[in-house]
Every structure is written in C-alpha cells, then in structure tokens.
Amino acid sequence: MHLSGRVALVTGASQGIGRACALKLALAGATVAAASRNQEKLNGVVGEIGEHGGKAKAFALDITDEEQIKSGIGAALAEFGKIDILVNNAGIARDQLVMRMKRADWDAVLNTNLTSAYLCIQQVIGSMLKQRWGRIINITSIFGQMGQAGQANYAASKAGLIGLTMAIAREVGSRNITCNAVAPGFIETAMTAALPEEFRQNALRNIPLGRLGTPEDVANAVAFLASEEASYITGHVLNVNGGMLMG
C-alpha cells in the first residue's frame, strides 16, 4: 500500500488511534497533516514520523470550533497544496444514562464526533474534486452499530457517521472519491483504559479473538482504505472488532 505523493489530514492525531493512523500513513509514504488541540503531543508525533524518515507537520486546532477547522485546514492546504486523504478520527465520550444525561454532554459529543467530520469534509472536498481523487475515512464505532447502555450520545454520533459516510460516498463517487468508515470494537486506548475492570473482562468474553484490539489494528484498516488497492470500495463500514459483532 504505497501512498507516495499523497497528503493525509488526520484529526485527533496526538494520541491513540489518530496517532497510529498518522504514523502508518506516513510510513506508507504519505505526507501527514496532524491535527489536534494538543500542540505538545502533536509535536511528538511529528517528531516520531521524522525519525522514521517520514514527513509531517502539526496543525493545532479545536475540532469543535468551525473557524479553527477552516483556518487549520486552510493552513494545511496552503502548506501542501492539496489534501488527498482525510481521516476523521477525533472523538470524545461523556457517558451517562439517558435519564441523567445533561444536554451539554449530548451536544459536546455530537459536535466533536459527528459535526466536526461534516465540517472537515466540507473544507477538503474542493481539493479532492479538483484533482478527481480522494479518500475520506470516518472512524465510527461498534457501538454506532449495536448501541450501548449509558452511551446514547456516543452511539448516536457514531451511527450518524455511518449515515454520513454513505451519503458522501454517493455524492462524490463519480469523481473518483471514496468515502468509507472503520468501526473499531474494544481498542486499547486512554478512553477504554478508564473503563472498570469488570466491564473489560466481560467485553473480552464476547470477543472471539480473545483480546482487545490495538490502535495499529485500526490504522492498518485505514491505510488500506486510503490506498489504490481499495479503489473499488466505497460506502463501506469495515469492522475491526475481533469478531465481537458479525454480519
């Protein structure tokens, strides 16, 4: 999967799945625009890519702020001249039973996980249409497919990403632009590390492969969907869940 000459923008690139995606895409030859709120962590990711012979630049932006998305992606376009690959990875969780969930927590999760993806797509789509080539990859979740108690906001946002993926795939397919989603299951990240141990063990019992996934497992799927090898795949949700959800 060679991505030489391609420019990839990854949101939430400072840690976890986003960091792994940035590293994987860079190792495959892409120039990476790494975006996140945390400048210090972004600099670390960019430095690590450089140590492996890759090329990357950090773009600090708050994915919930439309003006920062416009200015940040505008800066990336000015720097690299184009964006070929967009990975909408930035996301948060604010779990609570729906009867106790505050409106602010609903809005924060929907804005971060779903609205930001729509805004980022709007900012990069012109570049992709102009060159008649593009890859949009949205990081959704197994819980956007099957739901999860206490995560009405998170599940709704991730299900929304699946619908967004399919709609965009239909809109831009004729211009040689694909739009797909990757749906991770339980992945070893800072977000899942905060879960109670009993919850983790129960999850493991429901995973046929018998282990939690790694950020690299997800990044491998993203790199494939970004490549020429996936040129006839669009509107698809690629499950990376160890068999926890099938069909």
Image (cartoon, rainbow, N blue to C red):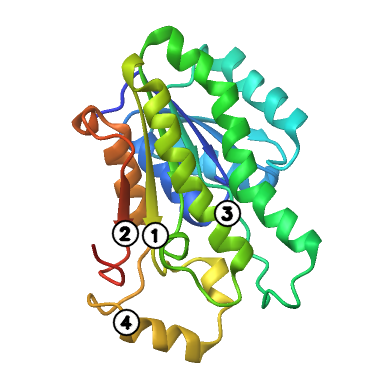
The residue carrying mark 1 is 184
The residues tagged by marks 1 and 4 sit, at their Cα atoms, a distance apart of 14 Å
Up/down of 18 relative to 137, above or below: below
Disc 4 secondary structure class: loop
The residue carrying mark 3 is 157
The residues tagged by marks 4 and 3 sit, at their Cα atoms, a distance apart of 23 Å
Which badge, 4 or 3, comes first in the chain's sequence? 3
Q: Nearer the viewer, residue 242 or 144?
A: 144
Which badge, 3 or 2, comes first in the chain's sequence? 3
What amino acid is found at the position of numbered circle 3 in the picture? Answer: Ser
Q: Give the percent coordinates (x, y) of residue 35.
A: 60, 37
The residue carrying mark 4 is 206
Disc 1 secondary structure class: strand
Which badge, 1 or 4, comes first in the chain's sequence? 1
Q: Residue at x 69, y 47 (%)?
A: 111
Contact check, label 1 and label 2, Cβ < 8 Å? yes
Which badge, 3 or 1, comes first in the chain's sequence? 3
What amino acid is found at the position of numbered circle 2 in the picture? Answer: Val
141 lies left or right of 108: left
The residues tagged by marks 4 and 2 sit, at their Cα atoms, a distance apart of 14 Å
Disc 3 secondary structure class: helix
Q: Nearer the viewer, residue 119 or 55?
A: 119
The residue carrying mark 2 is 240
Which badge, 4 or 2, comes first in the chain's sequence? 4
